[in-house]
């Protein structure tokens, strides 16, 4: 029997091994990682948020600890937060590789001033049930989790129900400045952003994607759009921007196939 994969596989075990490697390799990092359980899926898998913030005292201890929801919200009150989500759609495995890159990038090298100014929260596998059971787009209740953010039900969409509750509490103590929801795109090349229309409460939504496109050649600002279609009004990007009007909220799309360099597709 021959088995084909639509994209490079990335399972919940790959995620666990990644953070185990981080725990061993990043002992000297000035950012500490806290592992916060925020929800359970329908099948009982825990959903974790990985919080990265400046250590109060740099020492030889492990960079990872485990916190409760309440403990995580009480530390360093007032520091603004940045949130990354991945794998709402379990078949879009490139989201996990992008999330890995973000974590590695945050922990490596010197600590720039803006890394000291923010706390970073990564939810690397929102739809862990879908990943485990091999769904492409849905969770175990058969729902696309990125279409029910407006009114999630705890019994069918516990992942989103509890994440909204967590983000609401987080915003009270660590105002959310930026949310990036990482996805894969099956039709387009390159990486690009979907943003929301400008609003007076927040910064110009075009600036962040433009800056990213200047720093990373695989990101296309020309492909980025800043509109909300009718079928996206219940997705994370739209609902979270309404919950947190001062925050910049994006969907970050990454091609299944590659990126265009001139006339060449890499």
Image (cartoon, helix red, strand yellow):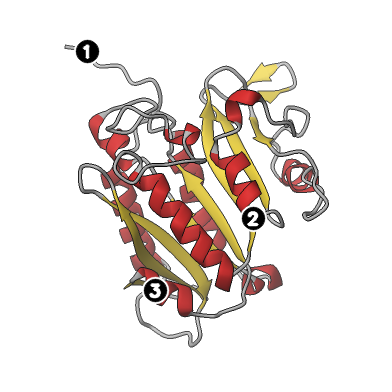
User: Label 2 to label 1, Cα distance in Å?
Assistant: 48 Å
Q: Estimate how packed mark 2 is, as few (under 14), some (14 to 19) or many (20 or more) residues with alpha carbons within 10 Å.
A: many
Discs 3/1, front: 3
Q: Estimate how packed mark 1 is, as few (under 14), some (14 to 19) or many (20 or more) residues with alpha carbons within 10 Å.
A: few
Closer to the N terminus: mark 3 or mark 1? 1
Could you say which is closer to the camera, residue 152 or residue 204?
A: 152
From what the image shows, is residue 73 above or below residue 37? below
Q: Estimate how packed mark 3 is, as few (under 14), some (14 to 19) or many (20 or more) residues with alpha carbons within 10 Å.
A: few
Closer to the N terminus: mark 2 or mark 1? 1
User: Label 3 to label 1, Cα distance in Å?
Assistant: 48 Å
Left or right of 188 in this view: 164: left
User: Label 3 to label 2, Cα distance in Å?
Assistant: 21 Å
Tell me the quarter of the image containing the C terminus.
top right
Considering the numbered disc 2 on the image, is that residue within a helix, a strand or a loop? loop
Instruction: Look at 38% across and 61% down and name the residue there.
Output: 22
Considering the numbered disc 3 on the image, is that residue within a helix, a strand or a loop? helix
Tell me the quarter of the image containing the N terminus.
top left
Left or right of 45 in this view: 92: right
Label annotation for residue 34:
none
Closer to the N terminus: mark 3 or mark 2? 3
From what the image shows, is residue 258 above or below residue 170? above
The quarter holding residue 23 reads bottom left
Q: Which residue is mark 2?
A: 244
The quarter holding residue 27 reads bottom left
Could you say which is closer to the camera, residue 18 or residue 235?
A: 235
Instruction: Look at 40% across and 25% down and name the residue there.
Output: 7
Q: How many marks?
A: 3
Q: Is residue 63 visible?
A: no
Q: Which residue is mark 3?
A: 70
Q: Which residue is mark 1?
A: 2
From what the image shows, is residue 134 above or below residue 208? above
Q: Residue furthest top?
A: 1
């Amino acid at each position: 029997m021959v088995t084909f994969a639509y994209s490079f596989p990335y399972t919940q075990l790959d995620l666990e091994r990644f953070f185990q490697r981080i725990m061993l390799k990043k002992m000297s990092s000035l950012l500490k990682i806290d592992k916060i359980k925020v929800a359970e899926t329908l099948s009982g898998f825990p959903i974790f948020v990985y919080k990265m913030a400046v250590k109060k005292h740099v020492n030889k201890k492990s960079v990872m600890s485990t916190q409760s929801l309440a403990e995580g919200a009480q530390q360093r009150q007032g520091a603004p937060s940045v949130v990354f989500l991945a794998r709402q759609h379990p078949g879009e495995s490139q989201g996990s590789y992008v999330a890995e890159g973000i974590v590695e990038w945050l922990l490596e090298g010197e600590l720039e001033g803006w890394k000291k100014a923010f706390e970073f929260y990564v939810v690397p596998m929102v739809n862990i049930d879908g990943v485990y059971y091999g769904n492409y787009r849905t969770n175990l209740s058969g729902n696309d989790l990125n279409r029910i953010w407006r009114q999630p039900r705890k019994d069918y969409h516990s992942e989103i129900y509890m994440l909204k509750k967590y983000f609401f509490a987080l915003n009270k103590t660590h105002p959310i400045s930026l949310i990036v929801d990482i996805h894969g795109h099956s039709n387009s090349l390159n990486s690009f952003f979907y943003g929301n229309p400008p609003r007076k409460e927040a910064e110009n939504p075009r600036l962040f994607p433009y800056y990213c496109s200047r720093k990373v050649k695989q990101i296309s600002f020309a492909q980025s759009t800043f509109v909300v279609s009718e079928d996206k009004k219940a997705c994370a990007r739209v609902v979270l921007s309404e919950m947190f009007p001062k925050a910049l909220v994006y969907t970050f799309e990454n091609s299944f196939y590659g990126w265009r360099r001139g006339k060449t597709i890499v």
